[in-house]
Amino acid sequence: MTHSEPRAGHSAARGLSDKSIRNLFIFPTIAFLIIFNIFPLLFSLYTSFTDFRASTNAPANWVGLENYSYLLTNEFIWRNFTITAKYVLISVSGQVIVGFGLALLLNRYMPFKGLITTLLLLPMMLSMAVVGLFWKLLYDPNFGIINHSLGLGKFEWLANPDMALWAVAITDIWMWSPFVMLLSLAGLSAVPKHLYEAAEIDRAGTFYTFFRITLPLVAPILMIAIIFRTMEAFKTFDLAYILSSQPTTELIAIRLYKMAFLEWQTGLSSAFAYIVLVMVVGITMIYVKYLNKVKER
C-alpha cells in the first residue's frame, strides 16, 4: 500500500495521462483532415453528379452520369488529354535522362562536388511563378538569351503553336531534373562497390557494367522518381499558364481551371477532376506494379 500511494500522487500531479496527451494531438489533426480534405472530397463527388454552378443561387439538379458522359465523348476534352499526355512524356523522359546523367557525373570524386550539387539543386527550390516569368524572359524573341545563344534570330518559342509545348516542357525539365538527380545519387551511392571491382577484374566493359550492374540496381529508385514526376506533371498548371496561352499548351489542369472559375461549370468541372483523378491513380498503379517486378529481380 505504501508503494502505490506515491504512484497515485505522481499521476495526479502530472494532470494529464499519456493517453489524454496523445488524444489532444490526434483529435485536432483528424478534425482538420475531415474539414479540409474529406468533406470537400465528398462534396465535390456529389457535385459531379449535378448541374451545380457556384456563380448562381439556383439549386443543384441531379443529372446522374450526364457530366461524365459529356466529358468522355467530347473531342475537345480528349484534345486536352492528348496534349497533357505528350507533355508528360516529354517532360518526365527529359527529367529522367538529364537527372540520371547528372547523377552519374556527380557519382565520382571531383573538386567542389558539394558546392556543385547544391547549385544544381537550386532550380527545384524556386517558385513555379518565378521560374515561369524567368524563362519567359529567356524565350523572348527580342532580347532573350536563348535565341541569341543558338543564333535563332527572332524565333518565337511561346507564340509558335508547334514549339510552345516543347518550351514549357524544357522549362519543367530544367526545374525538376535536380529532383531525379538527387534520388539517383542516393541509389548510386547504395550500389555495392565490390560489384564494380569484380566487373573490373573480369575486364567487363563500361556498357556491360552500366546495363548489368548500375541500371538494374538503381532502377527501383528511378521508378519512384518517375512515379512522383508523372503525378506532378499531370497536375501542371502555373508553369504552362504563365509561359503560354496557346491552345497547344492547354493542359487538363488549365482546362479544368477555365471550366471551374471562368465558365463557372462547377458540377461539370468536378466530374472532370474525378476523371483526371482516376486516370492518375490508374497510371500510378501500373507504375507501382512494374516497380514491384523490378524489385523482385
Image (cartoon, rainbow, N blue to C red):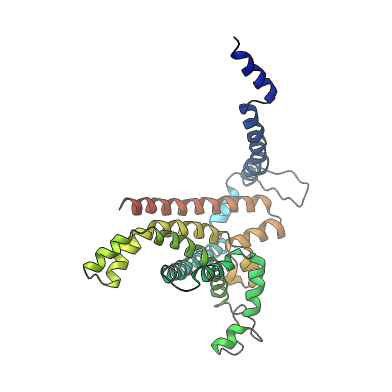
Q: Residue furthest right?
A: 57
Measuring from the top left, give residue 244's x and y in whole percent: 63, 73
Q: Is residue 73 above or below residue 66?
A: below
Q: Is residue 244 visible?
A: no
Q: Is residue 286 visible?
A: yes
Q: Residue furthest top?
A: 1
Measuring from the top left, give residue 251's x and y in whole percent: 58, 64
Q: Is residue 294 left or right of residue 124?
A: left
State the residue at coordinates (67%, 61%): 258
Measuring from the top left, give residue 188's x and y in whole percent: 40, 62
Q: In the rendered view of the protein, which quadrant contains the N terminus?
A: top right
Q: Residue furthest left?
A: 202
State the residue at coordinates (47%, 74%): 111
Q: Nearer the viewer, residue 160 or 197?
A: 197
Q: Nearer the viewer, residue 51 or 89?
A: 89
Q: Is residue 8 left or right of residue 109?
A: right
Measuring from the top left, give residue 161's x and y in whole percent: 58, 77
State the residue at coordinates (64%, 70%): 132
Q: Is residue 180 above or below residue 10?
A: below
Quadrant of the rendered image containing residue 50: top right
Quadrant of the rendered image containing residue 146: bottom right
